[in-house]
Amino acid sequence: MRHIFKINRHLSSSQIIIMGFMLVILTGSILLMLPFSTKSGTGASFADALFTAASATCVTGLVVQDTAAYWSVFGQAVILILIQIGGMGVVTIAVAIAVISGRKIGLMQRSTMQEAIAAPSVGGIVRMTGFILKATILIELSGALLMMPVFWKDFRFLKGTWYALFHSISAFCNAGFDLMGSREEFSSLTAYSGNGLINAVVIGLIIIGGIGFLTWDDIRWNGIHLKRYRMQSKVILLTTVILIVLPFLFFFFGEFKKNTWDGMTVGERVWAALFQAVTPRTAGFNTVDLSLFSESGQVIIMILMLIGGSPGSTAGGMKTTTIAVLFINLVSVFRRKEDSECFGRRIAEETIKSAAVILLMYLSLFLFGGIAISCIEQLPILTCLFETASAIGTVGLTLGITSELGTASRLILISLMFLGRVGGLTLVFAAFSDKARYLSKLPKEKITVG
């Protein structure tokens, strides 16, 4: 990992990030093909290993083989390491290793790190890396310790400890991988739908991992003094609250009031509604059978999956700030204001353009991918769109078709997962970073829209 920056000094930051993720996925695939990575002792096929490694590194959670039933403890450990690297980011891990080993961090490494965590400047990047590393370890261990008593009771000491650590890291990294297949394959956390402790801890880990490292930094230094926060942190926190509260109200008063869920108590419905409001934004766990949701409920989940988490976090998707910026611009246009403003600040026009491009890219890939899989597999379009939204949003939720898909459809999902994790603009910038920039401008002419 420490040699990641030495591949080629002429590579751009975007190209380094992409190559780093590709290298980790390939390495993970090779390890998962080893005989002792599977419980059968035969090793996984390249197709299964590649899909699993890509899903883990891109912290998605879509699986073609049940994690607990198919993979050995070694295979599960490989998957967990891939989740940790993918969640924190390949570059963050590389810089952290360099810092721990006492190596000097150059300007190029700092610049790459800046892009990887969406930092506003290269200043303080090394300090930020140390903070991210320490905070991650503390949060993941705390989550594991809180869940241990429940898992010890259900799986005894050693297995319960492993399960607690695995699910804590998976939740914090917004990965959605689980080991509950030891009870029932592909069941996720449905056995704990009424367990308040497991629900609360997993929800907390998902939210903390999904708000972004820079937001943590603001919280660390400014505490409850919200006025001192960066505008980005304010936008992230406000948007996150809205994207939790509104879906929760929809699920609780709409979805879970139906006769389908008559067997659940009011408390269980509250936890189920809250969990399903949080997890679609890239976490991938579920505590109820999502195939029992109405089509409107599944569409709401798809929208949340596409939005995803926040910049510089363990989550994927379009990002909360993208949707917030577009909404702020929408309000500005309706009010006929020249500039888009929020929290006493003006949003740069370049940011608005980038947000519009990201939205168009994600929607196009989501739709084309779903249509392609539907045509290839002859499956209902809504089911396939749910799958592609889950892949490009790096979520991992599914209506149960992942393991049944053919090679072509799996390659589509792998591509979407990869793009969803590294970011659409990162791929674009990597492809066109060396193109010449022209200072001259063509004549302007107005075109009517709307």
Image: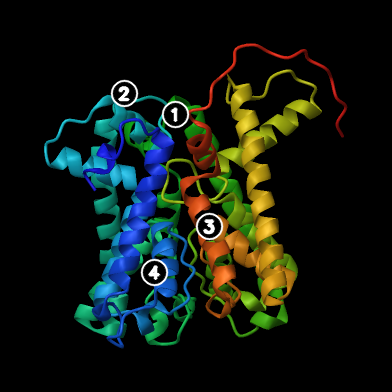
How crowded is the residue under tag 4: few (<14 C-alpha within 10 Å), some, or many (20+)?
A: some
- Labels 2, 3: front one: 3
Residue 282, how many percent across, how many down? 51, 57
- Labels 3, 4: front one: 3
Label pair 3/4, CB-CB below 8 angstroms:
no
Please name whichever residue, 12 or 340, is drawn nearer the observer in this view of the structure. Answer: 12
Who's the residue at 72% across and 70% down the image?
375
Who's the residue at 64% across and 77% down the image?
291
Above-or-below relation of 208 to 13: below
- The tag earlier along the polypeptide, 2 or 3, is 2
- Spatial separation of the CA atoms under disc 3 and disc 4: 36 Å
Quadrant in the rendering for residue 205: bottom left
Residue tagged 3: 415
Residue tagged 1: 229
Above-or-below relation of 82 to 322: below
Secondary element type, mark 3 = helix
Please name whichever residue, 54 or 279, is drawn nearer the observer in this view of the structure. Answer: 54
Name which residue type carries label 3: Ser
Residue tagged 2: 123
Label pair 2/3, CB-CB below 8 angstroms:
no
Q: Left or right: where does residue 418 sit relative to residue 56?
A: right
**Quick check: can you spot residue 447?**
yes
Residue 352, how many percent across, how many down? 64, 29
How many marks on residues?
4
Label pair 1/2, CB-CB below 8 angstroms:
no
Who's the residue at 70% across and 70% down the image?
374
Residue 141, how many percent across, how many down? 25, 59
Name which residue type carries label 2: Gly
Name which residue type carries label 1: Tyr
- Spatial separation of the CA atoms under disc 4 and disc 1: 31 Å
Who's the residue at 38% across and 24% down the image?
121
- Spatial separation of the CA atoms under disc 2 and disc 3: 34 Å
